[in-house]
Amino acid sequence: MPELPEVETVKNKLLPSLKNKIIKSVEVYYEKHSSLRQIKDEKILDIKRKGKYLIFVLKSYFMVSHLRMEGKYFITSQERINKHDLVKFIFDDFNLIYNDVRKFGTFNLFNKDEDIYNIYPLVEVGMEPFDIDKDTLYNLLNKRSEPIKSALLDQSIIAGLGNIYVDEVLFLSKINPYQKANTITLEETESIIDSSIKTLNKAIKLGGSTIKSFESLNHEIGHFQTELLVHLREGERCYTCNGYIIKNRCGGRGTYYCPTCQRLNKNQKLIAITGTFSSGKSTVLKILKELNYSTYSLDEIYNDLFMNSKEMLRSIKKALGVTSKEELRDLVFSDESKNKLLMDATHKYVMEALYKKIEKDNSKLIFVEAPLLFEGKLEKTFDKVIDVYESEEVLSQILKNKGFSFEEYQKRIKSQLSKEEKRQKADYIVYNDGTQKDLFVKIKGLLKNMEE
Ligand SMILES: [Zn+2]
């Protein structure tokens, strides 16, 4: 559906061809628009826009046009060309055709003495982001308990934003679409206005977005769709945090957002626990769990999806040609590039499943065991990273207990970053070089540090 930038583009395209031209008469092929037959020998003085409405200012009328889903204008010298052409405005040397496949578009004709901005439908159109001030918008949002996404789609609150641009605006403002409108702060309101202006101006400059069917005039398409930050980018990586964009329904509309950049619980901190194979990550996670912290393991989520997600298995099969765990293990250990393929094929499912779990979790600190955090370039998705670093002595003991030889270990960590690289990239380091009790004391110290 055309939103503000698309309608502004249509206006900008129509104006040079139609200004000061005279509509000789109008032929209507769809009775809903029969009132337009009154227009005879009317000069078009101007074309304006309010929200998603086009306002043709004629000599004796205002003609208000809403394109809804599929309404389109064509300027042509041909006669009626298509069964979906519903109205033909006849000029001296060309025709303006209104075409509407879905027939949802509307026309309202008013006499020139009517105060059109104060009667239906324009009276229901709120102020545009370009005109509204933060206090006015804040007060309007404050009265609404629905998700902010739905509130911003309501044209009586703010005009011109539709499904595409609200997703983009909320991403730029780092606001979760499900956040209740009446919890939006004044600062956030200001950010919504700034992001809206920025997004709309850029979209207008690029002639709007052509996603399904938008064409401004005579089949001309828009180009903003290539600039979208989140909308339609489900499963792709976030340009800010490198996490994964997800799609959910909000207020009945397909809604795209980054769950980490647009966190619902803003006080929540996501902490990754990483380290090389056998470094003691799981032990650290276990201790945190015993201390009643909220803990998740990406390996566990992966194993669970491996059993239950046909989608993830399809993705693995597509990337690597196999789906049995044993075959995968052999492939990944023998060829480093295969490990990357496996990560690319699975991480978005694993992260999506994690996001779903943490969206329901109100804990202030959430710990996630993420073995391939750096390899999967997921570190910016987390607020802090703990690296569990084992001494050679402890490592060889652990390996011995697990029945691994050092050669097997080296083979296994070949595709991972070295211990030293991980240590340098982490925010906190837990040296796992003593007993479990020592580890426990170290973790307690670390938690104290984090909670301050
Ligand atoms: Zn992000």
Image: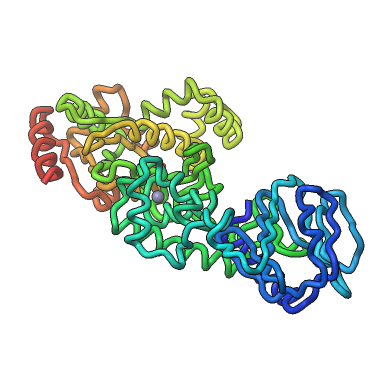
Q: Is residue 416 left or right of residue 314?
A: left
Q: In which quarter of the image is residue 47?
A: bottom right
Count up the numbered dots.
0
Q: Is residue 124 above or below residue 439?
A: below
Residue drawn at x 13%, y 43% is: 451
The percent position of residue 349, horizontal first and vertical second, equals: 47, 34
Residue at far bottom of view: 20
Q: Is residue 134 above or below residue 358?
A: below
The percent position of residue 374, horizontal first and vertical second, equals: 35, 46
Q: Is residue 50 visible?
A: yes
Residue at far right of view: 79
Residue drawn at x 50%, y 43% is: 255
Q: Is residue 74 left or right of residue 392?
A: right
Q: Quadrant of residue 43?
A: bottom right
- Nearer to me, 354 or 179: 179
Residue drawn at x 63%, y 55% is: 2
The percent position of residue 177, horizontal first and vertical second, equals: 41, 45
The percent position of residue 12, horizontal first and vertical second, equals: 65, 71
Q: Is residue 334 visible?
A: no
Q: Is residue 77 above or below residue 185?
A: below
